[in-house]
Amino acid sequence: MNFKTFYIFIYCVIFNTFYSYSQKNDLYISDTIPTVSEGINPLAPSTAAFYSAILPGLGQAYNKKYWKIPIVYGALGTSTYFYINNNQQYNRTRTAFKLLKAGKPHEFDGLNGNNLLSEEALVRAQKRFKEDRDLSLFITIGLYVLQIVEASVDAHLMLVNTDENLSFNPNIIIDPITNQIVTGVSISYSF
């Protein structure tokens, strides 16, 4: 290697080290504590759940999702209706069974145009209506808890930043070595 090439190489190395930077070392320390922006209420999920627990549908109104209120009352009303109806039928068959055991006339004795049900049929009817009543009660309680959870989750999701720059795109890639199709998923976020 000649000296001219060597001197040019050394000159380039030295010149580039004076004008190259690997990273910025600026450090700014703030003496204030960052606060939550004015539009976000971090206690909104617990407030929505509390309101829904007090009055069904109130948490949905707090979240400004008014279209969900008829769904909440429709679901709770339907399950409450079935609970009340099954409880009335259970009480009817229970009263008829007690009167049958006492030897008195009852609603299902077959007299005066009434339906005729045997003692075994009354026992089966009591059992079925009681099971249906209990199931309706569990469904009503489940729907009540579900609407509380829904109001809380909806309030949580309103706190999440849903920027339009976030995208989900499936890709089909051809492997250059094997010339086979490789499928994958790409999640990209633009700043």
Image: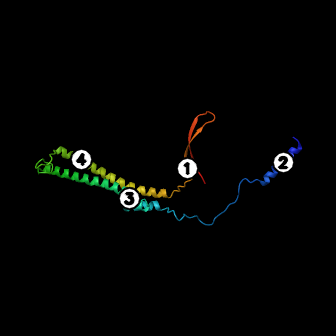
In the rendered structure, which amino acid carries the disc numbered 3? Ile
- N-terminal of the two: label 3 or label 4? 3
In the rendered structure, which amino acid carries the disc numbered 1? Ser
Q: Are marks 1 and 4 in contact (CB under 8 Å)?
A: no
Side of 109 where 21 appears, left or right: right
Please tell me how many numbered marks the rendered image carries: 4
Residue 152 drawn at (x, y percent):
44, 57
Q: Are marks 2 and 3 in contact (CB under 8 Å)?
A: no
Q: Which mark is residue 117?
A: none
- N-terminal of the two: label 2 or label 4? 2
Distance in Å between CA atoms under marks 2 and 4: 98 Å
Distance in Å between CA atoms under marks 1 and 4: 55 Å
Q: In which quadrant will I find the N terminus?
A: top right
Q: What residue is shown with label 2?
A: 10
Name the element at disc 3.
helix
Q: Do the residues labelled 2 and 4 touch (CB within 8 Å)?
A: no
Residue 86 drawn at (x, y percent):
25, 51
Q: Do the residues labelled 3 and 4 touch (CB within 8 Å)?
A: no
Residue 99 drawn at (x, y percent):
14, 51
